[in-house]
Amino acid sequence: MNKHLDIAILGAGTAGLNALGQVRRHSKNFLLIDGAAEDKLGTTCARVGCMPSKAMIHIAEQFHARRKFKKLGIEGGDELSIDSAAVMERVQDVRDILVDRVLSNTIDKMGEKFLNEFAHFADHHTLQLGDQTVGFDHCIIATGSRPVVPEAWQSLGDQILTTDSFFEQEDLPASMAVIGLGVIGLELGQALSQLGVNVTGVDTLTTIAGLKDPEINRCAIDLIQKEFPLILGQTAQLEKAGDLIRVTAGDHRFTVERVLVSIGRRSNIDRVGLENLGIQLDDHGLPAYDIHTMALKEAPHIFLAGDVNVDTPILHEASYEGKIAGHNAGTGSLSKFKRYVPLHITFSEPNICQVGQSLDQLDESRIVIGTFSMGPHGRALVMSNNRGLIHLYADKEQGTLLGACMVAPRAEHLAHLIAWCLEQNLGLSDMLRFPFYHPVFEEALQGAIRDALGKTTLVHAIPAELTPL
Ligand SMILES: Cc1cc2nc3c(=O)[nH]c(=O)nc-3n(C[C@H](O)[C@H](O)[C@H](O)COP(=O)(O)OP(=O)(O)OC[C@H]3O[C@@H](n4cnc5c(N)ncnc54)[C@H](O)[C@@H]3O)c2cc1C
């Protein structure tokens, strides 16, 4: 054995780097281990995830805004056009800046504390790292996930894209199918359509963006479908058709230049040799773990943080899980930490957000649903963006806030306010006592709170919006 570590961190993504921050406080005898090639390091978020996708969405939104110009009395919008090579260059520039920032603050400064190898467990306290064998007391698995591409489609060549390859494109195609309309597919599909690509979206499900509230789902579909066609409830088949790809989905048959496959991501847990630990793994190859300590139930000196556990594959959760795992590995304890209120945002236009408990988790006979339709909303009307619907869920008798689901402009901000109120266990009346400036999007939330409160069985001797001294 070459050496023995206090802590080994597998994966230099968001979860691994956040674990590193905690581990460093308690030990000098650790290694951060990631086998990705130099041009693949720098976190999924910065390189192929959150940030390049948001860079593209921002450009698409700016270009799409021209469609409202005429209504606002601005001439010349129709003459604007897209230079698709320049769009991709901008997306890649933003990505490079952010990847450089991640690397220069972390791996570039780590010297021998970073090892560029893929790790594999040999047993409960030993890792195989290339031709080295390294012992460890504690290990954090933060090896992330990868896009799923059905085997039959892998042979169709480089016209089949995933988010791993999409941002490397030098220009935009004339036509594209987006297979899978979860958060990633919907965000990128809409952005591509707004940039002038002839996009068709296909999903086996009849819901988009993982929505669980049927009315919000219907509203979101109606709004998105005004921009590009969605084929829902149909499974796509792909085949070569000359230089193009033919997509068949139910009765629909069409050809496209390229296809973005966004049908989900699978954990990289299958690549770390967990089978050598002799612990029980579920059908996805995942071991049982405690979400409050991040420790494996059958091997509590090993932790699982970030997308690798496929529980809540979003950045702020990966980062929090990394911190829990890093703290516990660093201190050699199994302290339990509270988890965040669920907060999910799809950066479509309008935004689609789910916060707290979703409708399918609630007993509808015991809740009220406060509704606000964006149609008459003053600020949204001024901005020519008065489309969408907000649903707020609260306990019928206590008026306690339980969750929300929305498709509304700038709902990303409303979702945060709701999440913070949920974190504080606030009720509808508490929320109404906060100030709401005029005219702001937050007034839509105020409308939904008022509507929900009116549907509860609560009786207020004084107006709910007044705070007695
Ligand atoms: C297109 C897209 C858009 C997204 N947008 C958002 C968004 O807007 N908001 C949001 O909250 N989230 C978003 N996400 C999700 C977010 O990016 C992830 O939740 C987050 O990046 C996960 O971080 P991680 O540390 O778990 O994994 P990663 O950052 O993927 O890190 C895992 C690391 O482990 C390494 N590794 C793998 N196997 C091994 C091994 N055996 N040994 C050593 N190292 C190994 C890999 O090389 C990689 O560097 C998006 C994701 C995608 C793909």
Image (cartoon, helix red, strand yellow):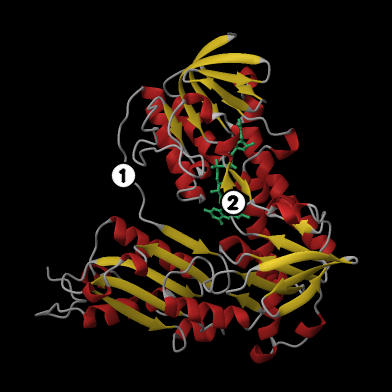
Q: Of 361 and 33, which appears nearest the observer?
A: 361
In the rendered image, residue 279, in percent from the top left (x then y), is placed at: 43, 29
Whether the residue carrying mark 1 lies under 8 Å from ligand 1 is answered with no
**Whereabouts is ligand 1, in terms of quadrant?**
top right
- Report the quarter where the N terminus lies: top right
Name which of mark 1 and mark 2 comes first in the sequence. Answer: 2
Where is residue 242, by image quadrant? bottom right
What residue is shown at x 79% (from left), y 64% (from top)? 239
Task: State whether residue 466 is above or below residue 14.
Answer: below
What residue is shown at x 53% (from left), y 85% (from top)? 382
Q: Which mark is residue 409?
A: none
In the rendered image, residue 24, in percent from the top left (x then y), is placed at: 47, 24
Q: Of 234 and 113, which appears nearest the observer?
A: 234
What residue is shown at x 36% (from left), y 33% (from top)? 297
Whether the residue carrying mark 2 lies under 8 Å from ligand 1 is answered with yes
Task: State whether residue 107 is above or below residue 192.
Answer: above
- Report the quarter where the C terminus lies: bottom left
Q: Which residue is mark 1?
A: 338
The answer for how far apart the CA atoms under marks 1 and 2 are is 26 Å
Q: Mark 2 falls on what kind of element?
A: strand
In the rendered image, residue 415, in percent from the top left (x then y), is placed at: 42, 65
Q: Which residue is mark 2?
A: 265
Report if residue 440 is visible in the image: no
Tags 1 and 2 in contact by the CB under 8 Å rule?
Answer: no
In the rendered image, residue 443, in percent from the top left (x then y), is placed at: 38, 77
Indicate left or right for 415 with 167 as reference: left
What amino acid does circle 1 point to? Lys
